[in-house]
Amino acid sequence: DQVFHIVPETFQQVQHLQHLCSTLPLDLWKPQLPEDIRTGEDLHIRVPAPLVQEVKDSLDHHMISYKVVIPDVQKLVDESMPKERSSDRQVPEGYIYTQYHPMEEIYQWMAQIKKNNSELVTQHYLGKTIENREMYYLQISQPSDKTKKIIWMDCGIHAREWISPAFCQWFVKEILQNYKSDPKISRFLQNLDLYVLPVLNIDGYIYSWEKDRLWRKNRSPHMNGTCYGTDLNRNFNSSWGSIGVSYNCSSETFCGSGPESEPETRAVAHFIERKKSDILCYLTIHSYGQYILTPYGSTTKPPSNSEELMHVAEKAAAALTGKYGTSYKVGSTSLILYSNSGSSRDWAHMIGIPFSYTFELRDNGTHGFVLPVDQIQPTCEETM
Amino acid sequence: AAMEVPLSHGLASRAAALATGYLCYRRGSPGRGLALRSLRRARREDIDDVGHKYYLELELEDVLDKDNTVNCTAEVLYHLGNKNTAPNVQFTLEGELKNTDEADNIFYNRIKSLEKELVAENIPDSHGNVPPEMEPIRLLAWVASGYVIWQNSTENTKFQLAQIKYVKQVKRSDEYLEFDYMILLHDMVSQEIIPWQMTVLWHPQHGVQVTQDSRQPKHA
């Protein structure tokens, strides 16, 4: 099948084109109806393969000039379809990564991923949330006799940032689907282990599905159950409670009753503390804003390895922009956004993890936290 | 004297967001919402006894047609001290905005001919979906929220419309369309979600007007 572009020059040409449309099974893309064909206006028409020669002959005969803008429609269709993997057994059958999933499904997904990729993936318990739900991270690790450095990535520390857990799931899928065929990924896994926590704030995430889409914090009760939630990203022991926080439970940036007062914070902090000498990079994924943020939020004084941190972040932002043109800003939180203390990223850097970044994914505010599902794929692809 | 402000700096992006909100209010319609595509340049002047003035060069995009962009210069003056006066915003658009008369009239006639008043909630829904017939209702809120954002912004706030909780049409005997909205604004700086009620009047030839608005308490 081919798609032709024609600009009719005379009324006779318009009439002939309308005649062709009514006598042959042609697919008019633009305009939608034959009666809307006009001189001087673009016409786009798909011609089924068996009719291509006949239509070309007819146009030539009537001195109507045309241009073939798509010489093979099927080829274009094939190229735009998500690639079918014959190795589908590596990924849960039919798990749709371009949709948002409730926590139940994410738990099931983790179990499936582990089961289908047991040579590479193990699931580990981190701790329990305030509402007693189990927190797990996935470890993607290629068996080897050398100890490897670790890259840690957590998603969903803020409940309403749904694109974040969606990205963690996408990331795992991409690695597992491509580690054999993609030389970059396979070299990566030879030297590094990946630890991914798909949802850190499980209770909050569930609450944003069931009760309040724009909930941010966890669900710890305060003041006799009259007020809920600590901002987990203000609860870490990095200049805790000093700036950019509220001591009031009703605020979105309530930092909790003390550093690491929340079980979710402790679960992550204790694990990272134990493994810190092997962790090369700490990544925490948020939305929205399109930023790659470096330490610190609590002070404008730059971290010791600030040049290197910025250099790497700028390369990452450039690679990201290269995919779909999405522009990301790079810099320290305290300069670009606002001051804040107790963030997980600041804490990770302060205990000695050299590369520590917060990613704020799409978008810029037009949709904000409620990013439409059709942006899940491009967001994840560019961030990958 | 005006000093350059780094484009990624929080202060520049807040002023840009405010200017965009104001501009959107002045030029928007149910067929046209404008959003900030990029900030090209920002300078700031501290005027003694008056306040802080930002000189901005912006690129805006049409929310419905991202490739449609327009450049603009804006001046934003945050008044010193007095938190009850809205910032002063002036702008100049370079070039023309797409004509939306046809879409506006279609929407106007559609609503005028409804038998029952329009009522809707959660736009967009949790997954970011907006049914096509609700898109003009959403854009109207986007435009009207520009007014609320303008009136309530300071150098320490950066507001965006997060979601429409509900909207109710109010039937009128004159030619205007009236909608009562409950919206949720997100302030990037404090991270707060602020419910806000606004009464919006619109007519294709008369633009968008917010005749009444009030901040609502956050429910427990």
Image: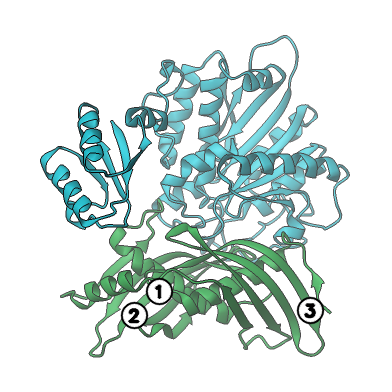
Chain colours: A cyan, B green
Same chain? Circles 2 and 1? yes
Q: Secondary structure at mark 3?
A: strand
Q: Is mark 2 in CB contact (under 8 Å) with mark 1?
A: yes
Contact, mark 3 vs mark 2 (Cβ under 8 Å): no
- Residues A321 and B77: in front is A321
Q: Which residue is mark 2?
A: B204
**Quadrant of residue A126 within the rendered picture:** top right
CA neighbours of label 3 inside 10 A, class few (<14), some (14 to 19), many (20+): some
Look at 77% across and 38% down and name the residue there: A355
Q: CA distance from mark 2 to mark 1?
A: 8 Å
Residue on which the image places disc 1: B29
Q: Which residue is mark 3?
A: B45
Tag 2 secondary structure: loop
Label 2: chain letter: B
Type of amino acid under label 2: Pro
**Residue A203: % across, % down:** 50, 46
What is the C-alpha distance between the residues marked 3 and 1? 33 Å
Asked where in the image residue A348 lies, by quadrant, the reply is top right
- Tag 1's secondary structure? loop
Q: Residues within 10 Å of mark 2 (few under 14, many from 20)?
A: many
| Kind of residue at disc 3 | Glu
Q: Position of residue B191 (x, y in %)?
A: 60, 62
